[in-house]
Image: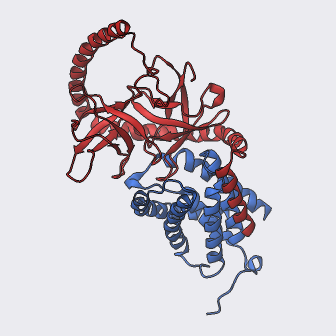
Chain colours: A red, B blue
């Protein structure tokens, strides 16, 4: 018993203070990968059945809501198509220098999620893509719905991804509503829990409204310390925005678009030109 | 005994895989069920402290490897949990109907505090509010799991005959 406790303490110390065990751990994770994939496949039909049953109950009301949204977004898309064309023209005219753009400056690597967040403490997942697929530490991870997080550890065929809901994660984000320009802040784990995020450091003179969409802010130009997250990745929607006399900044709660608790697959954005 | 070790290794491995690949994706009522903990405590109650400690160490290694987390972290907590409940099984818990439920209840709470403390010591983020808020739901889910899991483990590892457990402490009163 004492031997096992000592062995655990030695493992913690070595693993925490050096990278000596990383290759062994990576090999172990690669060996476990087929078993994890098999377990996920076995659970898949049950997960689908539960999701299908839930969908049946909400289908009618959801259909009505989505039709209304479709009409609205069709109009927005038409307007924005014109704006995108104008934007490209103006950039050329101004010889505008920019940081890497999403998605054209990145190569997508799709990967299956092997393990979901193990506990409330550690908001990390492991994915079935590693250095062999070109994935590196600090690569950005997304789904078609929006931002997931960043790669923090890589082995040959498995990587660990730190989710945006982890206490150690911070993302520079901005309100995408063109009526409220300049509301840039730092997106962190919300104190309310429940998978909510908090957009901090937004000064009181900026306007942010409930329902606004929050996207990654990226970094202006090619500075010495650019944000690892390219500009314009969807993050979530503002669920509450307020301020009081004591705090220097606004209190903004954001609900992520991605259901980070039950991810099944993700896309790693590998920069086409590594810095 | 060797057959017991093989059975336990397979059981713990499968439980760890189910935990990291399937169960961790769900958090009903804000908590999550910990199948590995329930299987480990059932094993420890039925086979004693050393068996429990070894199974806990192995289960922790599998979990930390699968999650690419700090190696030894989960092993340390599960080793202590397995040993402690194993001792409880060897002494006062013998033949008590409530022993599995008591063990799972107490260890679920202590495991949450242990994780919190260890993370704090290592300098990681340790959001006490979020963790303590999830404890009641996790406790409920683990207690619900205890009935079928302990039943299954008891079938696989029938209680030992008295001659096989002479090292145990026998209470006279």
From the image, which quarter does the C terminus of chain A lie in?
A: top right
Give above or below for A30 relative to B31. above
Q: Nearer the viewer, residue A212 or B34?
A: A212
Give above or below for A20 relative to A13. above
Count of labels shown? 0
Q: Position of residue B147 (x, y in %)?
A: 51, 64
From the image, which quarter does the N terminus of chain A lie in?
A: bottom right
Q: Position of residue A269 (x, y in %)?
A: 51, 26
Query: Residue A148: in sight, yes or no?
Result: yes
**Residue sitting at x 47%, y 41%:** A163
Q: Nearer the viewer, residue B74 or A275?
A: A275
Q: Position of residue A213 (x, y in %)?
A: 29, 32
Query: Residue A116: in sight, yes or no?
Result: no
Q: Nearer the viewer, residue A103 or B93?
A: A103
User: Furthest-right residue in view?
Assistant: B2
User: Furthest-front residue in view?
Assistant: A224
Q: Is residue A19 left or right of residue A74?
A: right
**Residue sitting at x 61%, y 45%:** B68
Q: Nearer the viewer, residue B121 or B94?
A: B121
The part of the image, by quadrant, that contains residue A152 is top right
The part of the image, by quadrant, that contains residue A73 is top left
Q: Position of residue B97 (x, y in %)?
A: 54, 76
């Amino acid at each position: 018993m004492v031997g096992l406790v000592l062995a655990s303490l030695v493992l913690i110390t070595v693993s925490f203070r050096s990278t000596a065990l990383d290759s062994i751990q990576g090999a172990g994770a690669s060996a476990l990968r087929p078993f994890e994939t098999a377990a996920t496949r076995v659970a898949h039909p049950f997960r689908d059945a539960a999701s299908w049953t839930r969908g049946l109950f909400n289908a009618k009301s959801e259909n009505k809501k989505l039709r209304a949204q479709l009409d609205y977004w069709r109009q927005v898309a038409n307007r924005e198509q014109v704006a995108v064309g104008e934007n490209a023209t103006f950039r050329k005219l101004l010889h505008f220098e920019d940081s890497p753009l999403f998605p054209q400056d990145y190569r997508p690597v799709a990967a299956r999620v092997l393990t979901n967040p193990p506990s409330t403490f550690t908001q990390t997942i492991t994915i079935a893509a590693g250095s062999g697929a070109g994935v590196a530490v600090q690569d950005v991870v997304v789904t078609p719905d929006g931002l997931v997080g960043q790669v923090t550890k890589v082995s040959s065929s498995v990587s660990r991804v730190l989710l945006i809901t982890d206490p150690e994660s911070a993302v520079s984000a901005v309100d995408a509503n063109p009526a409220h320009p300049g509301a840039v802040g730092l997106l962190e784990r919300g104190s309310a829990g429940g998978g909510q995020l908090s957009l901090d450091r937004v000064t009181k003179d900026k306007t942010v409204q409930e329902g606004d969409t929050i996207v990654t802010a990226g970094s202006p130009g090619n500075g010495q310390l650019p944000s690892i997250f390219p500009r314009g990745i969807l993050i979530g929607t503002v669920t509450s925005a307020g301020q009081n006399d004591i705090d220097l900044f606004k209190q903004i709660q954001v609900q992520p678009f991605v259901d980070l608790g039950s991810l099944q697959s993700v896309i790693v954005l590998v920069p086409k030109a590594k810095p | 005994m060797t057959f017991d070790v093989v059975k336990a290794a397979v059981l713990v491995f499968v439980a760890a895989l189910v935990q990291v690949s399937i169960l961790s994706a769900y958090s009903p009522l804000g908590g999550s069920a910990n199948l590995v903990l329930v299987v480990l405590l059932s094993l420890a109650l039925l086979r004693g402290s050393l068996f429990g400690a070894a199974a806990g160490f192995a289960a922790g290694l599998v979990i930390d490897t699968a999650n690419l987390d700090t190696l030894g972290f989960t092993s340390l907590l599960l080793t202590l949990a397995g040993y402690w409940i194993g001792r409880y099984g060897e002494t006062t818990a013998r033949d008590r109907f409530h022993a599995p439920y008591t063990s799972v209840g107490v260890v679920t709470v202590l495991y949450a505090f242990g994780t919190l403390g260890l993370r704090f010591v290592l300098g990681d983020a340790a959001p006490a509010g979020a963790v303590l808020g999830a404890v009641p739901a996790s406790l409920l889910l683990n207690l619900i799991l205890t009935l079928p899991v302990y039943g299954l483990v008891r079938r696989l590892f029938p209680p030992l005959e008295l001659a096989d457990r002479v090292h145990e402490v026998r209470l006279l009163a």
